[in-house]
Image (cartoon, rainbow, N blue to C red):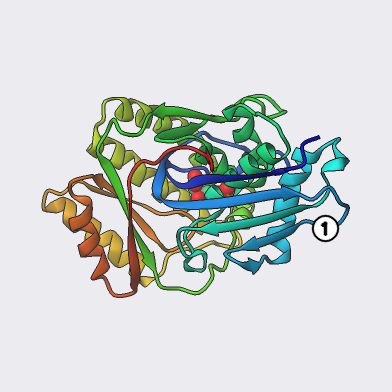
């Protein structure tokens, strides 16, 4: 075997316009619904994996600091899938760096696990298809499967129990449509509820979860159509509907998951005001307090300046449609 079991990959984060919320299979990470996201050029993770060829535990450094046990365990799960049947690869040394502060609460799992899936596969000497990489990344974090591809990406729900049809599919290349996101990072400590736990509670207990599943397929059909037509207001309206339904379901779970903070509501109000004054601006929120605003490439800087002035906003990141995973 090769003496250099080492590779480095760069993957971008993504922001869903039609959200993924809830698994039908926890182990394989199979969603109840499909979802659609934009890959974000400005937020990336670079990950180097080296298989040592020696027995032992995997080690994981995140931005130069030893990762916590839970994070290392999730990485090990993915590394085990790559190592399956090839004990000679041995323990892995993983070093991962984000272009954005992870403590700020911006989702790093999507870019992180997409980069890890690619770097580990390439380090092991494999040449997986993008579909196979997407499936691998999905096993560690659902939203990561979309970060394998660039532009606008759908994660198809799939029907198969083995999950081989629950993969990322590119719906529009980047560079064809001048749109962007301004992501307002709200000042908080670490988020209290993990999306994984909140999702599980929501599937099991929210009276609104069935409504989420019943209406998301329609949202996704509409979103795809508006994306093809490059109709920003129409796609933005679907995106707002999708995140509001996701949060309504999460808030009405037992225990409830309320991700919003006071600045979150102020930001939503600002977005509404911008729109009332004629600016195309549409909000979306993941499992946290931060607000991403989907808008045109020509309006994004002006919108960022408005969001930056909202009390409680620590920083605003601007992102445009980015590329898929790359080997460095
Ligand atoms: O990052 P994950 O795979 O635990 O899922 C998070 C899901 C949301 O970010 C809330 C929505 C989405 O589709 O990305």
Nearer the observer, 99 or 249? 99
Task: Characterize the local packing of mark 1: few (<14), some (14-19) or many (20 or more) Cα atoms within 10 angstroms.
Answer: few
Residue 201 lies in what quarter of the image?
bottom right
Query: Residue 169: where, in percent of width, then height?
Result: 50, 28
Give the residue drawn at x 64%, y 42%. Answer: 117
- Write down the residue under mark 1: 57
Give the residue drawn at x 55%, y 62%. Answer: 256
Residue 60 lies in what quarter of the image?
bottom right
Left or right: 174 in relation to 147: left
Query: Residue 157: where, in percent of width, then height?
Result: 56, 30
Query: Residue 89: where, in percent of width, then height?
Result: 82, 43
Q: Secondary structure at mark 1?
A: loop
**Image label count:** 1
Look at the image and tell me whether residue 17 can be seen.
Answer: yes
Give the residue drawn at x 61%, y 26%. Answer: 129
Look at the image and tell me whether residue 29 can be seen.
Answer: no
Query: Which quadrant would the C terminus be assigned to in this image?
Result: top right
Left or right: 121 in relation to 43: right
Give the residue drawn at x 66%, y 26%. Answer: 164
């Amino acid at each position: 075997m090769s003496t250099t079991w080492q590779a480095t990959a760069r993957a971008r984060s993504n922001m869903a316009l039609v959200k993924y919320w809830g698994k039908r299979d926890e182990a394989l990470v199979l969603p109840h619904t499909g979802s659609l996201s934009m890959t974000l050029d400005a937020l990336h993770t670079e990950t180097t994996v080296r298989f040592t060829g020696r027995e032992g535990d995997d080690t994981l450094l995140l931005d130069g600091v030893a990762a916590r046990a839970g994070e290392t365990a999730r990485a090990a799960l993915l590394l085990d899938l790559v190592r399956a049947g090839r004990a000679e690869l041995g323990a892995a040394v993983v070093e991962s760096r984000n272009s954005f502060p992870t403590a700020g609460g911006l989702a790093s799992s999507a870019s992180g696990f997409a980069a890890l899936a690619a770097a580990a596969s390439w380090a092991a000497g494999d040449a997986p298809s993008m579909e196979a990489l997407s499936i691998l990344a999905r096993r560690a974090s659902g939203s990561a499967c979309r970060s394998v591809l660039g532009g606008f990406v759908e994660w198809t729900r799939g029907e198969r129990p083995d999950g081989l049809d629950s993969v990322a599919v590119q719906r529009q290349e980047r560079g064809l449509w001048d749109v962007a996101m301004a992501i307002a990072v709200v000042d908080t400590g670490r988020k209290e509820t993990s999306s994984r736990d909140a999702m599980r509670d929501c599937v099991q207990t929210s009276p609104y979860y069935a409504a989420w599943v019943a209406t998301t397929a329609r949202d996704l059909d509409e979103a795809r159509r508006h994306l093809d037509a490059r109709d920003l207001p129409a796609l933005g309206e679907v995106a707002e509907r999708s995140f509001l339904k996701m949060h309504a379901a999460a808030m009405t779970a037992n225990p409830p998951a309320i991700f919003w903070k006071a600045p979150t509501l102020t930001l939503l109000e600002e977005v509404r005001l911008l729109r009332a004054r004629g600016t195309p601006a549409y909000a979306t929120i993941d499992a946290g307090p931060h607000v991403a605003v989907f808008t045109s490439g020509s309006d994004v800087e002006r919108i960022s300046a408005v969001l930056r002035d909202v009390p409680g906003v620590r920083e605003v990141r601007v992102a445009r449609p980015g590329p898929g995973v790359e080997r460095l």
